[in-house]
Amino acid sequence: MSKKGNILSLSMDADIQEKLKIVAKKRNVSVSKLVRDLADKFLNEEDNVDMVILKVPKDFRKDVEKLRSWLNHRTEAVISTLTSIKE
């Protein structure tokens, strides 16, 4: 992206902004770059794709059975939701 790109001003909750700062720092990029990448990724998704994002509790990393049970429960919820969507 050139230095003369368009400027967009955003308003967001402080906790979201803080999360963006943390992730940007971990990835060694600016918050602006991270937001551009997120927007680009979101906008370039194929129209015939439903995106499902799961936030998995970190405690389950060490307990395979808890993780399996948690994922099975979420899988059923995702299936139920996706199959009930009216196009």
Image (cartoon, rainbow, N blue to C red):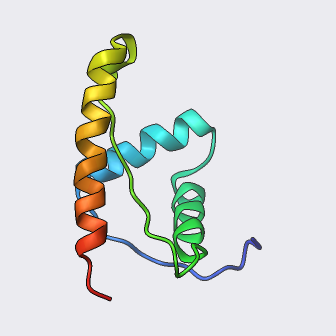
In the rendered image, residue 53, in percent from the top left (x then y), is placed at 38, 52
- Residue 12's quadrant in the figure? bottom left
- For this orientation, the residue located farthest to the top is 62
**Is residue 59 in view from this perspective?**
no
The residue positioned 26% from the left and 78% from the top of the image is: 85
- For this orientation, the residue located farthest to the bottom is 87
User: Disc count in the image?
Assistant: 0
- Residue 73's quadrant in the figure? top left
The residue positioned 26% from the left and 20% from the top of the image is: 66
In the rendered image, residue 33, in percent from the top left (x then y), is placed at 60, 58
Q: Is residue 87 above or below residue 56?
A: below
In the rendered image, residue 19, in percent from the top left (x then y), is placed at 36, 43
Q: Is residue 3 left or right of residue 84?
A: right
In the rendered image, residue 71, in percent from the top left (x then y), is placed at 31, 36
Q: Is residue 3 above or below residue 37?
A: below
- Residue 46's quadrant in the figure? bottom right
Q: Is residue 2 above or below residue 75?
A: below
The residue positioned 34% from the left and 44% from the top of the image is: 18
